[in-house]
Each structure stands twice: as structure tokens, then as C-alpha cells.
Image (cartoon, coloured by chain):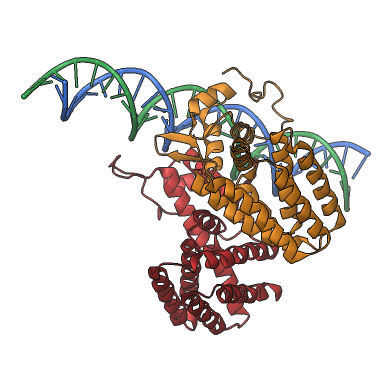
Chain colours: A red, B orange, C green, D blue
Amino acid sequence: MAKTALKPVPKEPALDRTCMRDRIREMLVARILDGKYPAGTQLKELALAREFNVSQAPIREALRELEGSGLVTSERYRGTRVRGADVDEMRESYELRATLEVRAVELAIPCAPEVIVDLEQFHRDMADAAARDSERYIDAAVRFHRRLTEASGNRVFVTVWDSLHFDIRGRIVLRRMVARGSSLAPQVKMHRELLDRIRAKDVPGAQQMMRKVFARVDDAFRRH
Amino acid sequence: MAKTALKPVPKEPALDRTCMRDRIREMLVARILDGKYPAGTQLKELALAREFNVSQAPIREALRELEGSGLVTSERYRGTRVRGADVDEMRESYELRATLEVRAVELAIPCAPEVIVDLEQFHRDMADAAARDSERYIDAAVRFHRRLTEASGNRVFVTVWDSLHFDIRGRIVLRRMVARGSSLAPQVKMHRELLDRIRAKDVPGAQQMMRKVFARVDDAFRRH
DNA sequence: CCATGCTAGATTATCGATAATCGATTGCTA
DNA sequence: TAGCAATCGATTATCGATAATCTAGCATGG
């Protein structure tokens, strides 16, 4: 309730190059991301306005942007709520992601060595965190896959990838897998093989391994 | 300049179930779509507000929604402009679309007969319009591909497909092809074969044909 | 007891006005 | 005349207040 929030530009009217609406939007995204606003939470405009020491207008605009990008939904005179993905939509999102990344890995294979270096680093992070810290694991995994998508050289791939908020969804999937007692070790191993085949420039092999990775994720969904 | 626009809710304050912001957004989308606002057009808030007989606020919110969905961009204190896709981004969008639809056709093949019926209808429209009315051709082609994407059963596919605004981009590509003197007849023929293979439930054949369709589109881009 | 209508409180939608910022122009100086 | 700063008009960003609408709870009548 207190002003944990962004400062209301107390003195310096210049120097801060971002407008309220942008800062508020990022604040809201962050809170949705870290679970502070779970799915279904109503985002009340005046309450947020009071908290951030701004008027209703920039709050509304931030919400409209989030609505456009699909993170929240709003209904006339009934407010704006954090959009929760049901299991079906989650599976469908991952179906799309799998399709996208199978193609991305093909485009990325003739890639520069620094991509491999990055992927190696992220894979080390994954392996390191797998047994001990599942939140750190998912961070590394998200970075791995996003980097690979970037390496495709197709910016629209990346935009779409980002717009589906796998950074958020990933956590949900992961918790589901962990809760079911699934070990992350097989995932680490599969990513190792994926990376080896990328380095060997083995396109069909890498694509097949990518499919295997996502098949395992889909298993986590199928088992309710 | 005059009020060709939506009525400002003259009397009946009830009965219209959509808010200003939604009507304004749809109005703006329509104008972008039909070329009334070409890429780069600055959308001035007060001017639009005057035209629509509303205040600045609902205009801004409509713009923020469009920004979230990527149709316009805005820069602090410099206004909002219609986003124009450069050729590179266009190619990348179609790369994504091809990837998506190659997968969609695979998912759609065990589809209900009514899907085939729809596709047949749209293909007839394409064939009918190909030689005479390229705008009608593109309408039919867009419907054909969107219907096929729907038939995949994956709603996220459709959402992403829609979000990339191929209904708009398609027109641009088409004009490019027509301007280069390309006949649409080969496209019609390829779609005919695609449809035949879908009906024959020949997944690899249909996928291959889909790739051919998009390869031809990419040609139109490659030739500047 | 149930259905219907009404009121109060909460919340969103819109307004009109003001502040902040930008781009171009003008006028001054050397 | 080139450079530069002050200024002006246009435009966006934000504000505070008001109108419209929703929900829940209560009252009323059958």
C-alpha cells in the first residue's frame, strides 16, 4: 500500500527520459511476472493511481498497452484483470513456440561462434541450477531459448516469442513439472545434445532434439 | 475533416454497448487498413478528438492499444505514427507465417469436411478474381489462409496470425507482385494443388506445396 | 419464499484545462 | 553570413473533477 513504487518525479522535471505511463507499465509487468498479481487480479485504476502518486490517466494508458499485448483483459465498466492462461491455451502457446524454434534452430545453425559461446554459458547455468534452484534454472532456460531464437536473425520471431511471455509461462510450467516430481536432469541432458548438434551444424539432428525438448514439456501438460 | 466519423452518442446514452475508445480504435484500424492513413502518418490526438467530438483521453487510449498490438509506434512528445513495415521486416513476417502455416496444415489435415467446403469456396473466389480484381483476390486469399490456420485448432496460431496484420500486408505484397507484372495464375494453381493434397490427407505433399506458395511470395520480395 | 426493483458504494469512462516538451523560426552577435 | 540562443506555435503528458455504469444488498410485493 505504501509507496514502494516509482518516485513521482519529485523535483527534477527533466533528466528522466521515460514517461509515467512507461514506468507504470513496466512496474505492472514486473508484478505480474513475479507473481505479485496472480491471474484474475483486478487492477483498480484509482488504487494504482494513489499508490503511484499519479492521476488515473497514465494508469489507464499503461493498462491499454498491456491489453493490446494480451497480458490483461478489460471489460467495460468492470475493470481490468490479469489474464490467466488456461491449460489449453498454455499447450497451444507451446505448440507455437516449438514450431517457431524448430525453424529458428535451422536458420541459426550457420551462426557466429559467439552465439555458441552464449548458449554454452546459459547451458552451464541451467545445469548448475537444475538440482538446487528451479527459479534460476528457468531463467537460464528462457535465456537459452530466446538467444537461439535471436540467432535465427529474424526479428519478428523474437517479437512474437516475447509477446507470448514465456518468461512468465515458463515459471508456471516449471513449477508444474517440479511439483510432479519430475527431475530437471533429462532436460539438461537434452539441451546438451541439442547444443552439440548445433555446434556440429547438424540441422535435422538439432531439429529433432528440439522437438524432443518440447515433447517433454507437453507431457507435463498432458498429465493434467 | 468533416464528421464522416462515428456519431458522438448524440442522444441515447444507453443502448450503445461499445465505449468510445473501442469505436475509435476500430475506426483507426479501418483507416489504416484501407490506406487512408499510409505508413508514417502522424495521428494527432487533438485533431482526432475534434473530428470525433470527444476529448483527448479516449483517443490516447485507443492509440495505446494499437501501440500494444504493434500497428503504430509512439515517441515521447513526438506523437504516434502509423508503423510502416520495411521490406526486411515484411520478409521476416512472411517467414514466420510460412513456418506457422506449414505446421497448421499438418494439424488441420484430419479436419472436418466443412473446412474443405470453406476452402473450396475461397479458392473459387481467388480463381474468379485473379485475372480481374486483384483486391478481391487478396481478400479471398487472406480468408483461405486464415481459415486453414483456424482449422489447426490452435487459437494461439490464429491470434498471432491476426496480430501480424496479413490482411494489410497482403495487399502490399500483392500490389508489388502485380506491379512487377506477375500473373496470379500460378498462385491459383498452387493453391488448387494444395487443396487437393489436403483433401487427400497427404500431409508431406500439402506441406511441400505450402512451402512453394510462400517461396513464390518471397521471390516477390527478393526482386526488390 | 421467491422474484423484482431500488438505492448506495465502488469503479470505470470521459471531460476540459494545464504543464511539459519539441521543432522551427526569428533575431542578435560577431 | 554563420552560429547561437530566445521564443512561439504545435503537440503530447498529466491532472482533477464529473458522468456513466456496475454490483451487492435491502426492501417490497406477490
Spot occupied by residue A202 in the image (x, y as percentages of width and height) = 53, 75
The front one of A119 and A24 is: A119
Q: Residue at x 56, y 83 (%)?
A: A186
The quarter of the displayed image where residue B97 is located: bottom right
Number of numbered discs overlaid on the protein picture? 0
Is B141 situated above or below A86? above
Spot occupied by residue B161 in the image (x, y as percentages of width and height) = 64, 51
| Residue A71 visible somewhere in the drawing | no
Residue A16 as seen in the image, left or right of residue D13? left
Q: Residue at x 83, y 58 (%)?
A: B199
The quarter of the displayed image where residue B150 is located: bottom right
Spot occupied by residue B98 in the image (x, y as percentages of width and height) = 63, 56
Residue A193 as seen in the image, left or right of residue B188? left
**The C terminus of chain A: image quadrant:** bottom right
The front one of B199 and A222 is: B199
Q: Residue at x 71, y 54 (%)?
A: B149
Is B5 situated above or below D24? above
The front one of A24 and A66 is: A66
| Residue A145 visible somewhere in the drawing | yes
Is B21 situated above or below A119? above
Spot occupied by residue A1 in the image (x, y as percentages of width and height) = 46, 54
